[in-house]
Amino acid sequence: MRIQRALARAGIASRRRADEMVAAGRVRVNGEVALVGQLVDPQHDRLSIDGEPVEPPAAARWLVLHKPAGVVTTRRDPQGRRTVFDLVEQIPGLTYVGRLDYLTEGVLLLTTDGAAAHGLAHPSRQVERSYVATVRGDAGRVLRQARHGVSLEDGLVVPVDLDATPRGHGRWELSVTLTEGRNREVRRFCQALGLDVERLVRTRFGPVTLGALAAGASRALTRGERSALDAILNAEQTR
């Protein structure tokens, strides 16, 4: 990971402040003066600031949960409804990456790396999110219009990918991939097209897919998924 992120993860300083410390020559990696944006492995490289060693941060925990409908994406719910944290292992510092609304199902990432969670969920990151919506209405008719973008109250939404398959009895299966990550974006997108959403499932967040994970179940991310997420975060830091 980038050195500023490693220092932030270790609780030394914010990323911005860490950048300033590196630029001032106060940080060393394995005895050598660090460079701004340098890649490090906090578990193996020796980091120090002003000659004082930096304790490596605990390795971040990452989970993917198949969130069922009727579960709230929050730590505690005033109404006493089940939350996503009721469905996973109780891990100190665990937080979610973005939200899924009460009725939406599917991929929800959780991690103890708060900075990474914020970075991946932010709309500016353009992380792809794929959904399958079961809708009522003439999805085939509005498909061409939707591919060119749909205006919502908070801006234009242009899908990265969009397809519709008829399922009979007035129902369609709408597959859509977006990158903005706005609040209830897919539901508002469908509403603007005159489509009623009966069911909504997020099947992918970035490199992490739902696969055969059962509703309510969770698993640790694979090494490949972790590496792909790190690549997204590191790419953003160099822009």
Image (spheres, helix red, strand yellow):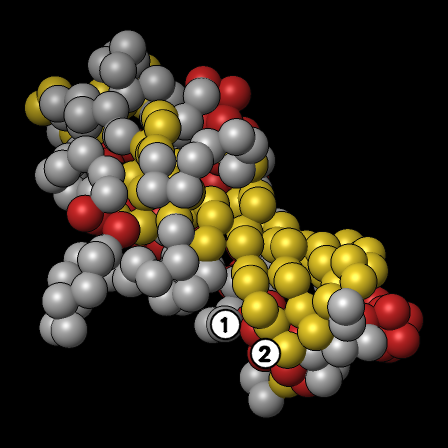
What percent of the width, then of the height, locates residue 213? 46, 32
Tell me if 217 is positioned left or right of 135 in this view: left
What percent of the width, then of the height, locates residue 189? 65, 75
Task: Give amino acid for label 1.
Answer: Arg
Helix, strand or loop status at disc 1: loop
What percent of the width, then of the height, locates residue 13? 19, 45
**Based on the displayed image, in which of its 4 quarters is residue 94 positioned?**
top left
Q: Which residue is mark 1?
A: 184
What percent of the width, then of the height, locates residue 199? 55, 63
Mark 1 → mark 2, Cα distance in angstroms: 6 Å
- In this rendering, the count of numbered labels is 2
Residue beneath the point at 52% across and 30% down: 212
- For label 2, count other residues whose C-alpha is less than 10 Å away and answer few (under 14), some (14-19) or many (20+): some
Task: Give amino acid for label 2.
Answer: Arg
Q: Give the label on residue 62, or none.
A: none
Residue beneath the point at 63% across and 61% down: 133
Q: Give the label on residue 188, or none.
A: 2
Q: Are marks 1 and 2 in contact (CB under 8 Å)?
A: yes
Q: Tell me if residue 199 comes above or below residue 153 in the rendering.
A: above
Q: Tell me if residue 155 comes above or below residue 161 in the rendering.
A: below
Tell me if 195 is positioned left or right of 199 in this view: right
Which one is nearer the viewer's eye here, 100 or 134?
134
Which one is nearer the viewer's eye here, 182 or 231?
182
Residue beneath the point at 57% across and 45% down: 203
**Based on the displayed image, in which of its 4 quarters is residue 200 positioned?**
bottom right
Query: Is any atom of residue 105 visible in this view?
Result: yes
**Based on the displayed image, in which of its 4 quarters is residue 218 positioned?**
top left
